[in-house]
Image (cartoon, rainbow, N blue to C red):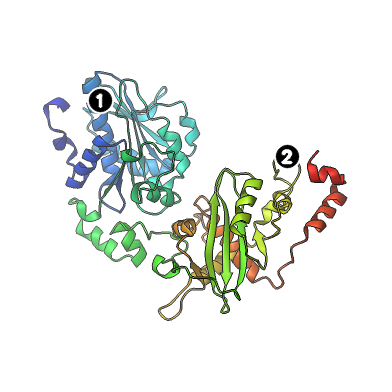
């Protein structure tokens, strides 16, 4: 029987130069992303690098039964990308692909190679791994997953006596997680509380880096439409398959700021959130019906009073035709601190911000956004952005189509800025935009409907 210790790792894996580069980078970093295009051998590298690490850790620590996890977004993807390939690629003398009543499905290394386990799992419910531990976590097609998946699995990244646990991933551009993956590994924009920033590394690989590909595959990629070709052949993270607002271009839609003429009309539009971002956009409408998004607020984890205060501070000295918000904030399901039973809209009204509800016709709103983003060589778009609106500029081009409804976008993406824009554009096209009720009218209605005492309404006692 062949012995791993008596042959080179290169002779076993036949890694390409780019895959060897990825291994070298992963050896030095805790969080490594490999690929960013179609065809460089991403999935192959994930499974073989995981096996290599299990064996090397055994040789280093003499510790048996070390676990690694190889994950895909669902079981069909796991089967197609990994299980079937492992069945034919991994030699029988190295271990066995099997399902254990104790360990579940995985590839189990022979005892002479440490008895490590490469667990094969799908991510339909990441919370089921909260009690698991892995010395290595590998995710195939990382952008198919929301950031919460990464947050959960990185907490599982630990194993006794192993100080260099690894997170490795491979992916194409696109997918619901495109925005957050690009932000971290490509743009190097981290949350302020990220303490491991130097540990994140990206190894870009192209199909031309894989000498095992048949030339016909490269020709297939070269024949794709421009955006798909740029994503899959060239590894361009700014365009990708399934992009919902394919009209978007930073060069066209982002303009240099200028003083807003006093004769232009101004508006505010708001999408509420606490765990998800709360977004307020300030929009100026010129005399030709062109919309300029000139200011934005994008905050998370704040209550109504805090959000309202920030909106008011940024609105100083300006007058608005009206302010519009998601119609759901008018439902009696939200509660504001100290004002039990108060809707979110009433909470804003108490702070001096009067919203009126947006249209409920979601798909119509997206159709309007497509129209306003559209441009030609001789016609500029009707929706433009000042560069300080960084979250709108970042998030809108990353949104993708919903798999179940091709007229809609996938709401798993960062769609808060887009939602706020949708509310506003639809309000412009209402036959007659409803006039916001005065604060007094809202108070009287609330007193009549709920028979509140006036003092109770004002002081919450």
The residue located at (45%, 35%) in the rendering is 152
Image check: 41 left or right of 454? left
The answer to which of 375 and 35 lies nearer the viewer is: 375
Element at badge 1?
A: helix
As drawn, 255 above or below 445: below
How far apart are the alpha carbons under marks 2 and 1?
55 Å
Res. 70 image quadrant? top left
As drawn, 172 above or below 431: above
Is residue 400 shown to the viewer in this render? no
Q: How many marks?
A: 2
Place of residue 159 in the rendered image (x, y in percent of width and height, measured from the top left): 35, 24
Place of residue 312 in the rendered image (x, y in percent of width and height, measured from the top left): 63, 55
The answer to which of 87 and 415 lies nearer the viewer is: 415
Element at badge 2?
A: loop
The residue located at (41%, 29%) in the rendering is 156
Residue 325, numbered circle: none
Residue 57, numbered circle: 1
**Which residue in the protein does label 2 denote?**
338
The residue located at (35%, 62%) in the rendering is 228
Q: Residues within 10 Å of mark 1 (few under 14, many from 20)?
A: many
Image check: 342 left or right of 405? right
Q: Nearer the viewer, mark 2 or mark 1?
A: 2
Marks 2 and 1, the one that precedes in the sequence: 1
Is residue 303 shown to the viewer in this render? yes
């Amino acid at each position: 029987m062949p012995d791993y210790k008596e042959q080179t790792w290169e002779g076993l894996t036949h890694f390409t130069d780019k895959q060897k580069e990825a291994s070298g980078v992963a050896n030095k970093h805790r969080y490594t992303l490999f690929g960013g295009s179609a065809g460089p051998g991403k999935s192959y590298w994930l499974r073989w690098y995981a096996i290599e690490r299990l064996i090397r850790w055994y040789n280093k620590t003499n510790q048996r039964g070390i676990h690694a996890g190889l994950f895909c977004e669902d079981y069909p993807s796991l089967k197609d990308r990994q299980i079937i390939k492992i069945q034919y690629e991994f030699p029988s003398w190295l271990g066995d692909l099997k399902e254990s009543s104790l360990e579940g499905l995985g590839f189990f290394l022979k005892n002479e190679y440490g008895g490590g386990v490469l667990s094969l799992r799908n991510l339909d419910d990441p919370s089921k791994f909260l009690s698991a531990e892995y010395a290595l976590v590998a995710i195939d097609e990382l952008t198919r997953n929301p950031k919460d998946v990464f947050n959960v699995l990185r907490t599982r990244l630990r194993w006794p006596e192993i100080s260099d646990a690894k997170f490795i991933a491979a992916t194409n551009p696109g997918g619901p997680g495109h925005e957050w993956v690009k932000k971290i590994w490509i743009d190097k924009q981290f949350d302020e509380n990220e303490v491991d920033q130097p540990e994140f590394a990206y190894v870009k690989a192209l199909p031309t880096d894989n000498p095992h590909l048949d030339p016909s595959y490269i020709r297939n990629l070269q024949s794709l439409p421009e955006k798909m070709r740029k994503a899959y052949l060239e590894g361009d993270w700014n365009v990708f398959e399934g992009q919902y607002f394919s009209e978007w271009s930073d060069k066209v839609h982002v303009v240099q700021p200028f003083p807003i003429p006093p004769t232009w009309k101004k508006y505010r539009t708001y999408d509420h959130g606490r765990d998800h971002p709360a977004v307020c956009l300030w929009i100026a409408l010129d005399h030709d019906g062109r919309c300029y998004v000139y200011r934005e607020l994008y905050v998370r984890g704040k209550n109504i009073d805090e959000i309202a205060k920030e909106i008011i501070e940024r609105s100083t000295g300006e007058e608005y035709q009206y302010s519009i918000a998601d119609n759901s904030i008018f439902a009696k399901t939200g509660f504001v601190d100290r004002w039990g039973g108060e809707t979110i809209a009433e909470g804003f009204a108490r702070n001096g911000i009067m919203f009126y509800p947006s249209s409920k016709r979601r798909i119509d709103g997206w159709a309007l956004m497509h129209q306003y983003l559209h441009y030609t060589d001789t016609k500029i778009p009707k929706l433009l952005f000042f560069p300080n609106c960084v979250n709108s500029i970042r998030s809108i081009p990353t949104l993708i189509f919903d798999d179940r409804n091709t007229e809609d976008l996938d709401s798993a993406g960062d769609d808060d800025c887009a939602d706020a824009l949708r509310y506003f554009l639809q309000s412009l096209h209402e036959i007659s935009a409803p006039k916001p009720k005065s604060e007094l009218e809202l108070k009287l209605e609330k007193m009549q409907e709920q028979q509140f005492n006036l003092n109770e309404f004002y002081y919450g006692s």
